[in-house]
Amino acid sequence: MEITEELGANYLVLEDRVKEEDRYLLRMLTENYIKNLLSCRCGYRNEEAVLKYEVSNMHSLVTEYEHSILSSTELENMLLELLSIGTRAREYLLDEKNIVYNPEYMFVDVEDDSLNLLCVPYETDEMIALHHMNKGRYYFLADFLLDKVDHNDEKAVKIAYEFYRMSKEELFSLEKFCTYIKRLQTDSKESKLTESEAVCTMPHEEKVDSFLTDPKDDVISTGRESKKTFSIRSFLQKRRERKEDDIKMPDGIVTVDDYWGASDDEDVIKCSGVRPEEEEDDDNLTMFFDVSEQEVHRIVWYENGKEQTKVLTSWPVVLGKQKGTDNLCINDPSVSRRHARLNCRNNSIFIEDLGSKNGTFMNGRKVKSGEEIPISAEDRLQLGRVALSIIS
C-alpha cells in the first residue's frame, strides 16, 4: 500500500487482486457512497490494475495522534464510531473482515473530524499474516490505543487494556465490547448521581471533610478490583517506560510558593537574593528564582476582529481548530483542524503545513505539506484567511 498524488488529489493505491466470485464486493464499493468508508475506484498504474482510495484532506490515526493522547471520552467515541461503521458496511453486504483496522490506514478527515476506514474486497497480505500468527484483525489497533491512551486517565487505561485483552479472544466482536463501554458509561452516570445525592444529604461539616480528602488516600488493598488495577499498571510499566513531563518554566521572577513544582537542578534554576545560611534565621523567608534568561516566544493573531496572544511554552505546537493539550485553537472556518505545526530548535522557530485544505503561507509563499521552513519576527504568516506573527 502506498499513497500517491494525481491531479491534486491523494490516493491510497492497492493492487487489484479481486477474484471473480468477489467482484460484487468491488461493485458495492465503487458504485455506492458509503459513509465513513474510503471511496474506491478502479484504475491502472504501469499497465497494472489497481484500486484507488481517495484520502485527500485526511490524516492517518498515526499522524493525528503523533503529538497528542487519547482521553477516555475520545476512546469511547472512537470505538462506538467503529461499531457504527461496521454496521453500515453490512447494509451493503460488506463483511467486517474486509475492513482494515490498522491505524496507518485509518484516516481522520481534517474538516469534520470523522473517521474513515479502508475496506478491501479481498484478503490483503497483512490480513493473511495476522491469520497465520493467530493475531486478531484488531491487533495493530489495540496496540496503538494502549500506546496513545492518557495514562493519567484511569478510565481510559481500563478501556484500552480491556480492548487489548479481549481483542485476542477468538469470539471477540466490536458489538460485544461496545456493550461493555455502554455499561461503563451507565455505571459512571449512576455513580455520579449517587455521590451527588450523598453530598446533598451530608451535614455541613462532613461535606467540608469530603472535599478536603484526597481520593488517592482511599487505597483498596484487597479484593478483585485492586488486583486488576495493579495488573494493568504493571503491564503498562513493563510495556514501555513513561517519560517525565518537561518542566514548563514561566518568565520573570517567581517565588517558591508560586512555582513549587520546579526542578532541583541548579543548571535549570538559579537561586538569587538571600544566602542559604540566612534561611534558618527567618521562618517567613521568601526565595526567588530567576528564570528571565529564557527566551520567550509569543504568537499573535486576530480572531473575530479581536487580537489574541499566547505564550508558547512547549513544543511542538499544532495550530488549528482541534482543541488539545499541545494545540493552539484558532476558531476560523478557513483553518483546518490540524492546519500547521510550529517547532523550536536552538531558539529558531520552524513552521510546517499539515496537509491543510486552504494552505499555509509565509510572506505570500505557500508552504508545501511536510516542508519545514524557519521563520523570524519579521515574517508574515497566514493560515487560510487568518494572519499571525511570532514575537520573540
Image (cartoon, rainbow, N blue to C red):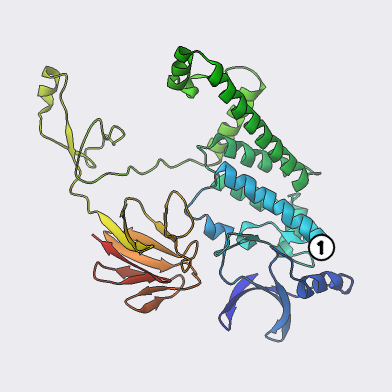
- Between 256 and 306, the one nearer to me in the picture: 306
The residue located at (39%, 62%) in the rendering is: 304
**Badge 1 amino acid:** Leu
* The N terminus, quarter of image: bottom right
Query: Which quadrant of the structure image shows residue 172?
Result: top right
Graded by Cα atoms within 10 Å as few (under 14), some (14 to 19) or many (20 or more), the crowding at tag 1 reads many
Q: Secondary structure at mark 1?
A: loop
The residue located at (32%, 44%) in the rendering is: 248
Q: Is residue 379 visible?
A: yes
Residue 122 on image: x %, y %: 79, 67
- Between 21 and 249, the one nearer to me in the picture: 249
Q: How many marks?
A: 1
Residue 272 on image: x %, y %: 13, 36
Q: Is residue 75 left or right of residue 84?
A: left
Above/below status of 188 relative to 14 = above
Q: Residue furthest bottom?
A: 47
Residue 285 on image: x %, y %: 15, 24
Above/below status of 253 relative to 305 = above
Query: Which quadrant of the structure image shows residue 41?
Result: bottom right
Residue 81 on image: x %, y %: 68, 53
Residue highlighted by disc 1:
94
Q: Is residue 153 left or right of residue 292?
A: right
The residue located at (28%, 44%) in the rendering is: 249
* The C terminus, quarter of image: bottom left
Q: Is residue 50 visible?
A: no
